[in-house]
Structures are given as C-alpha cells and as structure tokens.
Image: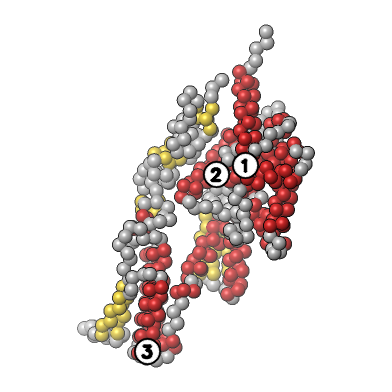
C-alpha cells in the first residue's frame, strides 16, 4: 500500500482551502481550479508554474476594464484627467493595499523569508494607518514602499478569472469591482503632490527647488520655496521622500495663505486714523465671531523711559488669545493661535505707524516674534493638551511629538523604547506578530485552539 507524504497532503489541503475562500470572496466559481492554483504560486516556490503569465494578462485586463468604467462614468473629463484616474486605480500602491485589506498574501505559495518580511512591514504600516484613520493616497507617501508581489497577486487572480470566463471583460469587471472598492473618482483623488506644488508656485510667481541627499539608508528631501525651507520628507525610497516633502510644503503654504486670515490694514501705508485703527480691531473681532472663537483682549499702555535706554516705541500693543480649557480642543487651535499672533503683530505695526513710530523697527520685531512663535507652537511640550485632541496621533508627548505608547513601535510602553526589527507594539509591549499565537498578524489576533502562528498566519500541524 502506497503511503502519502504528510507535507504534500498539508500543501494540497491548504491549496483547497485557499481556492474555496477566494471563490467565496470573489463570488465566482472557477471551472478550472488549476488557473487559480497557478495564480497563487510565486516564482520562489519550486517545481510549480508561477503566476507571472497570469499576472501579465490580468494587468492588461484590469487596465482595460478600469478604462472602460472611467470613460463611461466621466463623460466630461479630458484624457489627461482620465489617465490620472486610471493610474491611481491600478497603481502598485492601490493594488497592494487591496491585497492587504483582503489578506490575499496568506494564500500565496512561496519560499522566501525576505519576501515575508517586506510584506510584514508594509502590512503593519497599513494596519497602523487604519487604526489612526490616516487614510491613504493613490500616489503613495508611506514610509515603506508597497511590495510589488502584493499587487501581482491581485493582477494574477484577475488574470485567472479573465481566462477562466473565456476572456469576458464585462464579467471580469462584475467580479472584480467589489474587490477594488472604493474606486478612486475625480472628487476624492489626491493630486500628485510634486506636480501640484510646481503648478501652485508657477501660478503665484514663486521659485521652487527640491534637493535630495542620502544619510545612511535614509533619503532626505527638502523643498525650498523662494529660498525658504517649506517641506521635509524622509524615507528609504527617494521617490517617497520627495512626495512627503512636496506634501509637507503644500500643507504649510495652504496654512500661510488661508484667505480667511487676510486682514487689510490700510494704516500700514501711511498715517493711520482712529477710524482705521478701530476698523482693524473690528475686522479681527468679526473674524473671531464668525469662527466662534473667544474674543481677543487688547491691552495698551504708554511707553516709559528706562534709566539707561531711551524708549523707542511710545505705545505697546499686546493681544492675548486664550485657548478653550476643554480637553476636546482640536489640532486646529494650533493654526488658530499662529494666525492670530500674525494678525496681532500686524495690528501693532499699524498702530505704531499711525503714532509715528519707526516702521522698520516695529516690522522687524514683529517678524522675529512670529518666527519664534511658529517654532514654539510646533511642539507638544508647549501645548500638551494638543495630544488629547481629535486627530492627534496619540495622547502621550514624546520627544516633542504626540504618540501612542500602546501602539508606537518607536515608543512602546514608554518614550524612547524601540521594538526590535520584525516586532510590533501591542498594548505597550513589543511582540512578534509573525510567531505569537496570541497576536498573529496583528494585535489581539488569537489563533484558534490547536493551531500555531507562522509568518503572521494561523495554521495547523499535519
């Protein structure tokens, strides 16, 4: 009597379970199961045909299916915008996140520890983003590059469906549309940040320069606008570092140029009158009332001569803005404080000019104070309440930044405690979610009784 190999039986049983689960996920029953088995085989798996041919077909089929869908649902969009939408929906980043969302990598037959580690790092990042509700952009921006193998799995499965249904493109789209949801549309697509930054600077007549250098294994990119540093990006990938720097610069430029914060002070051009000074205060009060902020408090006192230094300014203007005491203050309070400080300095300069004070001296002091206030407001050490605000990365302040010591791998349990490579932070403890049966593939993901955890997936011994 011929004995069967236990390892072969285990592999066959795992493949049958994978086929069943994928058919349930797709809502489609394969006529030829060997196509799906081929789609789930990596080139590192010996003595089996890999998914490369099906991935080639699936890439082209998905691209054409997405093209048809976008063309029919967006009759008013031009070819440039349609191309950008198609690229966003079939990019490696998008398809890799689809594979992570549906946990497709666990079905792949492979024999590569390096591949497992790459997928583990990217999956861990996506899970953290999901917990913190950061969201994602179709053009990347993460600190870890999306592994191509994840996108290849999606494309190879699509190729298997396309070949199995006798190359019926309409049926392929019906089967695969639910997997690709949400489909990126023109309303929710994030523009490519580098292109957007160049277009914005060109429209405003500003100069833009992006510099990159490498420190060890990390690429650092700086974005300069009119010679001033506006954006910083860091990543192991040069392209992602450039995207992060451009995105950082766009956020700062939009915050500095918010139209609601523009206050016209006509008295800065000449001698101000009482009506002009009152008008500036009135505009500021109206703005605060419109935004439902606490009204500013003005305090003015006559300048006095010091014993060893003559008084250079006859009038001092101070504006105090009190942040709400509630712990629910959101992070926009930081931007509010900065903008109001700029308005206060502008008002002080206008009043000083109207009273024949040296304009250049007042303006210089104003710029210095604004610069210092922006640097101070950027840290949670100055505003610890910001870490408890809605949208904050976490309630704990570590190294002048808000973190969550329960999930942050760089500050796990306490500030500065780093988890070793390949480990994740779960409830303030560094655990190995690749092999820990109580945290298999993620925090609090227990494997069923009698199973074990390997490479972040639960399995059963033969």
Q: Nearer the viewer, residue 448 or 336?
A: 448
Packing grade of label 3 (10 A; few <14, some 14-19, many >=20) is: few
At mark 2, the secondary structure is: helix
Q: Nearer the viewer, residue 37 or 344?
A: 37
Q: Residue furthest top?
A: 1
Q: Quick one: SS at disc 3?
A: helix
Q: Which of the marked residues, 3 or 2, is nearer the chain's N terminus?
A: 2
x, y percent for residue 153: 65, 40
* Sooner in the amino-acid sequence: mark 1 or mark 3: 1
Q: Is residue 444 left or right of residue 155?
A: left
Residue 400: x and y in percent read 38, 56
Question: Residue placed at 54% from the left, 69% from the top?
Answer: 225
Tell me residue 55's x, y (percent).
Answer: 71, 41
Answer with the quarter of the image where residue 122 lies. top right
**Image position of 328 with respect to 58: above or below:** below
Q: CA distance from mark 1 to mark 3?
A: 66 Å
Q: Residue at x 59, y 75 (%)?
A: 205
Which mark is nearer the camera, 3 or 2?
3
Is residue 111 visible in this depiction of the protein? no
Q: Which mark is residue 86?
A: none
The residue that disc 1 covers is: 150
Q: Secondary structure at mark 1?
A: helix
Quick check: 69 left or right of 374?
A: right
The residue carrying mark 2 is: 122
Q: Residue at x 45, y 40 (%)?
A: 424
Q: Neighbour class for label 1 at 10 Å: few (<14), some, many (≥20)?
A: many
Task: Verify CB contact (< 8 Å) between mark 2 and mark 1.
Answer: yes
- The residue beneath circle 3 is 275
**46 lies above or below 410:** above
């Amino acid at each position: 009597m011929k004995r069967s190999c236990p390892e072969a039986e285990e592999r066959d049983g795992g493949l049958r379970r994978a086929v069943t689960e994928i058919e349930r996920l797709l809502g489609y029953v394969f006529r030829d199961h060997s196509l799906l088995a081929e789609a789930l085989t990596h080139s590192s798996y010996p003595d089996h045909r890999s998914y490369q041919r099906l991935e080639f077909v699936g890439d082209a089929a998905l691209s054409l299916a997405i093209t048809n869908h976008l063309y029919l649902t967006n009759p008013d969009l031009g070819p440039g915008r349609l191309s950008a939408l198609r690229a966003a929906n079939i990019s490696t980043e998008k398809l890799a996140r689809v594979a992570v969302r549906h946990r497709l990598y666990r079905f792949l037959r492979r024999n590569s520890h390096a591949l497992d580690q790459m997928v583990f790092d990217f999956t861990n990042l996506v899970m953290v983003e999901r917990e913190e509700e950061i969201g994602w952009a179709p053009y990347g921006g993460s600190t870890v590059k999306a592994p191509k193998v994840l996108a290849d799995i999606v494309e190879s499965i699509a190729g298997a469906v396309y070949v199995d249904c006798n190359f019926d493109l309409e049926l392929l789209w019906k089967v695969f549309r639910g997997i690709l949801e949400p489909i990126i549309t023109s309303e929710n697509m994030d523009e490519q940040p580098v292109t957007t930054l160049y277009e914005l600077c060109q429209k405003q007549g500003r100069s833009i320069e992006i510099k990159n250098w490498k420190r060890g294994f990390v690429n650092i990119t700086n974005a300069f606008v009119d010679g001033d540093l506006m954006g910083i990006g860091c990543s192991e990938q040069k392209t992602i570092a450039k995207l992060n720097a451009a995105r950082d610069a766009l956020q700062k430029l939009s915050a500095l140029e918010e139209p609601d914060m523009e206050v016209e002070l006509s008295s800065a051009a000449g001698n101000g009158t009482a009506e002009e000074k009152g008008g500036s205060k009135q505009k500021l009060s109206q703005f605060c009332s419109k935004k439902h902020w606490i009204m500013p408090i003005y305090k003015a006192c006559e300048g006095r001569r010091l014993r060893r230094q003559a008084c250079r300014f006859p009038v001092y203007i101070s504006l105090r803005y009190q942040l709400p005491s509630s712990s629910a203050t959101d992070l926009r309070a930081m931007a509010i404080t900065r903008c109001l400080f700029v308005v206060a300095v502008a008002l002080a300069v206008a009043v000083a000019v109207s009273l024949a004070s040296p304009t250049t001296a007042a303006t210089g002091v104003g710029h210095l104070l604004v610069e210092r206030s922006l640097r101070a407001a950027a840290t949670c050490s100055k505003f610890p309440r910001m870490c408890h605000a809605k949208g904050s990365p976490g309630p704990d302040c570590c190294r002048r930044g808000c973190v969550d010591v329960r999930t942050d791998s760089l500050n796990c349990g306490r500030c500065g405690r780093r988890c070793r490579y390949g480990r994740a932070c779960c409830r303030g403890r560094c655990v190995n979610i690749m092999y820990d049966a109580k945290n298999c593939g993620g925090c609090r993901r227990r494997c069923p009784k009698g199973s074990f955890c390997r490479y972040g997936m639960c399995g059963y011994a033969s």
